[in-house]
Image (cartoon, grey):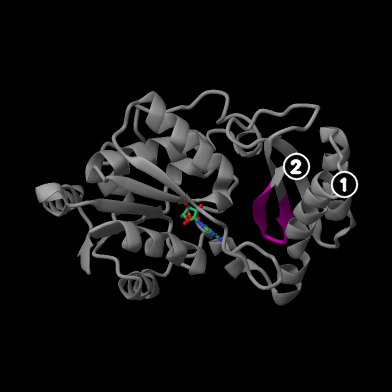
Amino acid sequence: MKLIRERAGLVASAAAARSGGRSLGLVPTMGALHAGHVSLLEAARRDCDTVAATIFVNPLQFGESEDFAAYPRDEERDSQVAAAAGVDILFVPTIDEMYPGGSPLTSVSVSRISTALEGASRPGHFDGVATVVTKLLSLAGPCRAYFGEKDFQQLVLVRRMVADLSLQADIVGCPIVREPSGLALSSRNKRLSPEQLEQATALFRALEAGRRAIEQEASRVADDVEQTMQKVLSAAEGVEPDYATVVQATTLERRPELSGDLRLLVAARVGPVRLIDNCTARA
Ligand code: AMP
């Protein structure tokens, strides 16, 4: 595995990897790698001749009151995990390397999608995401880029951005990897106590209750399903609910009457961290 810290190194290695019609897969991450990240790396390994992963805790996507400083970082362990998962190129830039002129004057913004849900609670977050993903795609020029459904709104936003800007990469979505308790794996879980890890399973339980309401009890009213999910979150000790909603899966549009392919999404604060989770349902 080749460790690269400079943009020029990534550009050169990615170009060499793509030569002769060979395929390159890119897996952008913020590190503190867990089995969720590994599932993305393995999908890329299966599909592509060369796998590039990036580790960059992107300051642009953190709000002032958010956990940028406290975000878990462990480069040594991450590079072992990446190497074991078959990564060929690991790009770990500094903030100066990614933003050499300081905070960029140019920003990529995907309207509508970026201001709903996570965007409503985290103003500017998705502009930071869209900007850094555009830069990584531009540097590596991958054939495919892999994103987890764990950050479902991010996946929808990246797909739309790539289509709108005609960026030349196929975006591949990968299923959520969970603990046996149902809790979705997240780097932020590392900051939770054993008790808080148990409390955090309320997010998954809320989604399951919402999905049951739609698929088994044939509830077709968005308000009712959302209330069902809210109740589970509110009843859980140590959990401060943010939102619990049901939207159309491809557009994230909320309709009062439920039909077709849906996505249930929840967000809540547990102890020091804000957690998100989601699942599918069909009406
Ligand atoms: P992050 O390091 O949190 O920015 O995540 C990097 C990529 O891994 C994103 O595309 C995430 O959606 C994905 N990811 C994070 N957690 C999981 C999970 N539990 N299952 C699947 N993918 C995940």
Dot 2 crowding, Cα within 10 Å, few <14, some 14–19, many 20+ = some
- Position of the C terminus, as image quadrant, is top right
Considering depth in this image, is 16 or 22 the residue closer to the camera?
22
For the record, the magenta segment spans 268-280
The answer to whether residue 282 is visible is: yes
Residue beneath label 2, please? 243
Describe residue 128's horizontal placement relative to residue 8 as left or right: right
Residue 45 occupies quadrant: bottom left
The image position of residue 240, as x and y in percent, is 79, 52
Count of residue discs: 2
Magenta stretch: dominant secondary structure: strand
Please say if 106 is above or below 118: above
Which of disc 2 and disc 1 is earlier in sequence?
A: 1
Q: Amino acid at mark 2?
A: Tyr
Question: Marks 1/2: CA distance?
Answer: 12 Å
Q: Is residue 279 magenta?
A: yes
Disc number at residue 228?
Answer: 1
* Closer-to-camera residue (75/89): 89
Element class at badge 2? strand
Asked if the residue at label 2 sits under 8 Å from ligand 1, the reply is: no
| In this view, 55 is above or below 161 | below
Q: Is residue 51 magenta?
A: no
The amino acid type found where label 1 is placed reads: Thr
**Residue 237 at what x, y percent from top left?**
86, 62
Residue at 58% x, 69% y: name it: 190
- Which residue is located at x 53 percent, y 60 percent? 70
180 left or right of 25 in image: right
SS class, disc 1: helix
- Residue displayed at 46% across by 30% down: 160
Q: Position of residue 180 (x, y in %)?
A: 67, 73
Residue 161 located left or right of residue 196: left
Give the quarter of the figure containing the N terminus.
bottom left
